[in-house]
C-alpha cells in the first residue's frame, strides 16, 4: 500500500508539472488545459511503454523493473487486475468503468511498447552484433544502479526484516559462482 501512496503522490507531481508546462506553452484556456493534460498523459504512457519494450528486448533486464523504477508498476498491475476481475466489492457499473480505464491505459502502454520493441529490434540488434561487451556493460550498470533505487522505494517494507538478508547473500553467491 505504501508504494501505491508514493505512486499517487509522484503521479500528481508529474501531472502538475506537465500541466504547468502546457499552460505556459499554450493558450491557458480551461478547455485547452483538459485536452493538453490528456495529450500529456497519452504521451507519457507511450514513453513508459517504449521504455518497457527496450528493457524487455535486452537479456537480463525486465520491463516490470523499468515500470517500477519509472513509478507506474502499481498502476500497471492494478490495470491488469481490473481488466481480469475488477475490484471485489465494486458494483457492475464501477467494474465496467474500471475495465474501460484499464483497457485505455494498457492500450496506450501497448502502443508505446510495440514502437519501442520494433525500434529495439531494428537498432539494438545491429549494435549488439558490433559492440556486445559495451552494450552488456551498459545494461549491467543500469541493473546495478537500480538496486539502491529499489531499496529506497521499498525501505518501509524492508524495516525489521533483516533475516531476509541471508537470502540476498545466497542469491549473490549463486550469481557470483555462475
Image: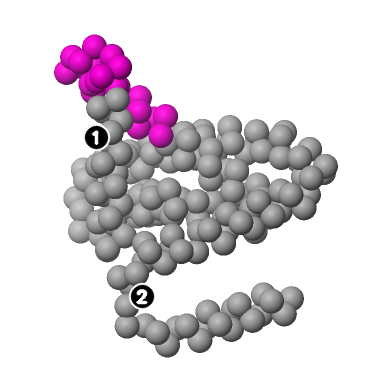
Is 58 left, or right, of 31 in this rendering?
right
Identify the disc placed on residue 49. Answer: none
Circle 1 residue = 16
The range drawn in magenta is 22-44
Q: Is residue 160 left or right of residue 147?
A: left
Q: Position of residue 143 (x, y in %)?
A: 57, 59
Q: Nearer the viewer, residue 12 or 39?
A: 12
Q: Give the residue number, with chain letter if any, for mark 2.
A: 158
Q: Which is more toward the observer, 107 or 13?
A: 13
Instruction: Answer with left or right where residue 135 lies relative to residue 32.
Output: right
Quadrant in which residue 159 is drawn: bottom left
Q: Is residue 72 magenta?
A: no
Q: Residue 96: in sight, yes or no?
A: no
Q: Quadrant of the C terminus?
A: bottom right
From the viewer's perspective, is 142 left or right of 155?
right
Height in image: 160 above or below 63?
A: below
- Pick whichever of labels 2 and 1 is earlier in the sequence: 1
Q: Residue at x 39, y 30 (%)?
A: 42
Q: Where does the image place residue 133, in percent across and percent down from the top left?
A: 77, 53
Q: Residue at x 53, y 79 (%)?
A: 168
Work out how far the residue at label 2 is from the one at label 1, CA to CA, in angstroms. 30 Å
Task: Label 2, secondary structure: give it.
Answer: helix
Query: Image quadrant for the N terminus?
Result: bottom left
The image shows residue 123, relative to residue 53, as above or below, that is above
Check if residue 28 falls in the magenta segment: yes
Instruction: In the displayed orientation, state which residue is furthest to the right.
Output: 130
Tell me which residue sits at (27%, 63%) in the image: 2
Amino acid at each position: 500500500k505504501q508504494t501505491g501512496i508514493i505512486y499517487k503522490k509522484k503521479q500528481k507531481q508529474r501531472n502538475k508539472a506537465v500541466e504547468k508546462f502546457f499552460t505556459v506553452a499554450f493558450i491557458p484556456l480551461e478547455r485547452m488545459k483538459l485536452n493538453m493534460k490528456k495529450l500529456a498523459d497519452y504521451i507519457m504512457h507511450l514513453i513508459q511503454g517504449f521504455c518497457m519494450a527496450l528493457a524487455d528486448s535486452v537479456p537480463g533486464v525486465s520491463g516490470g523493473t523499468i515500470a517500477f523504477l519509472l513509478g507506474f508498476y502499481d498502476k500497471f498491475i492494478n490495470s491488469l487486475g481490473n481488466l481480469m476481475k475488477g475490484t471485489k466489492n465494486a458494483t457492475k457499473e464501477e467494474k465496467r468503468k474500471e475495465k474501460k480505464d484499464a483497457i485505455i491505459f494498457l492500450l496506450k502502454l501497448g502502443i508505446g511498447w510495440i514502437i519501442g520493441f520494433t525500434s529495439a529490434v531494428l537498432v539494438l540488434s545491429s549494435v549488439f552484433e558490433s559492440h556486445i561487451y559495451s552494450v552488456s556493460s551498459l545494461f549491467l550498470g543500469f541493473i546495478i544502479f537500480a538496486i539502491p533505487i529499489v531499496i529506497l522505494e521499498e525501505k518501509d517494507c524492508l524495516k525489521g526484516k533483516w533475516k531476509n538478508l541471508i537470502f540476498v547473500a545466497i542469491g549473490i553467491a549463486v550469481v557470483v559462482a555462475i
